[in-house]
Amino acid sequence: MEHLGWDVVDRELFTQALAHRSWCAEHPGQVPNERLEFLGDAVLGLIITDFLYRSHPGLPEGELAKARAAVVNSAALAQTAREVQLGNALLLGKGEDSSGGRLKPSILADAMEALIGAIYLDAGYGFTEQVVLRLLGARLREAAKGPGEDDYKTRLQELCAQTYDELPIYRVVDRGPDHAKVFEAEVLVGGRSRGRGEGRSKKQAEQMAAKLAWRDLMAEAEAVTDDYGWCPAEPGNLVQPVSEPTGAGSTALAQPSPAVTPASSSQAPSSPVEAMSGAARPASSNPSGRANEGEQSQQSLAAAG
């Protein structure tokens, strides 16, 4: 993958990372990406946990866990996969492809983990760590800060990632002359409109909409408590607790440069390796090297920022 600086050595391994089980069912003898997904999930979790532990020595265990959960979840991984246009290179069966499989969050998230697993086997831990921190660095920095008191966009994003396994979607329109423009925002969660807001800026309108949506969803959680005697917002239940924000900040994702040539929605690329690989691996990468006391992790993240 050119924009990741990964010069693929084992091309069969790379192709396997893109192979969905629906495609393998139509091509006997091909191996699906599920085992690589299993490995990639573990590698991703270790990289993120190791970085947070070393770079935030004063952060308590509970805050470390919340920061990791904000990055290691299906919604965040699916979003990252969209940014690197991974869906265009997936190998899908005809039925899955025609039903929009290239856009499905679960398929994208699984493929992202499989790709991380493949990079680890092909290039080693040290290089994989660089790639992960480059892709997820911005989100990781914001997650470690924690949301601010009035940052309802981040609070809503955390709640949605934990409850619906997807991120909220904002629709914004503006009206009026340039000197007196007014923005109107609508936020959708799980395909439903959950809040509307208005403001003199896009950010202000989105924050207002997010605030209404967050309160609406929390009210639903309280209703479950009243009806069934347990609260989905407590540890061990469906939703993890959403903390009251303490400082300014909002979640952002890294913007990697596009490298994949879009494929049609009904046909997978004939050669995913040719579509996504080609750049030389940095000379400094160490296939078997681990970060020395967190220095490599922090240098990688600083470069990403």
Image (cartoon, rainbow, N blue to C red):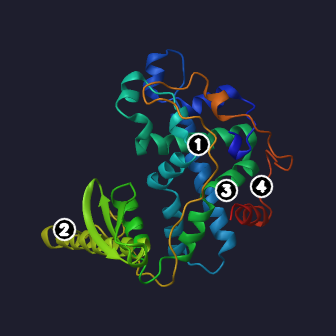
**Which quadrant would residue 136 be assigned to in this image?**
bottom right
Question: Viewer-nearest of labels 2 and 3?
Answer: 3
Q: Residue 188: name its quadrant.
A: bottom left
Under circle 4, the secondary element is loop
What SS does tag 2 mark?
Answer: helix
Pointer 2 local density, CA inside 10 Å: few below 14, some 14–19, many at least 20: some
From the viewer's perspective, tell me whether residue 282 is left or right of residue 67: right
Residue assigned mark 4: 290
Q: CA distance from mark 3 to mark 1?
A: 20 Å
Disc number placed over residue 134 in the picture, else none: 3
Q: Is residue 29 left or right of residue 227?
A: right
Q: Residue furthest top?
A: 28
Residue 253 drawn above or below residue 107: below
Residue located beneath label 1 in the image: 39
Q: CA distance from mark 1 to mark 4?
A: 17 Å
Q: Is residue 98 visible?
A: yes
Choose the circle earlier in sequence order: 2 or 3: 3
Quarter that holds the N terminus: top right
Q: Looking at the image, do the residues carrying marks 3 and 1 touch, with CB atoms under 8 Å apart?
A: no
Badges 1 and 4: C-beta atoms under 8 Å apart?
A: no
Q: CA distance from mark 2 to mark 3?
A: 40 Å
- From the top left corner, tell me how far across and down residue 193 is, in percent: 25, 61
The residue depicted at 42 percent of the width and 43 percent of the height is 106
Q: Which residue is mark 2?
A: 224
Q: Position of residue 166 (x, y in %)?
A: 38, 54
Label 4 to label 3, Cα distance in Å?
A: 16 Å
Three-letter amino acid code at the position of disc 4: Arg
Q: Secondary structure at mark 1?
A: helix
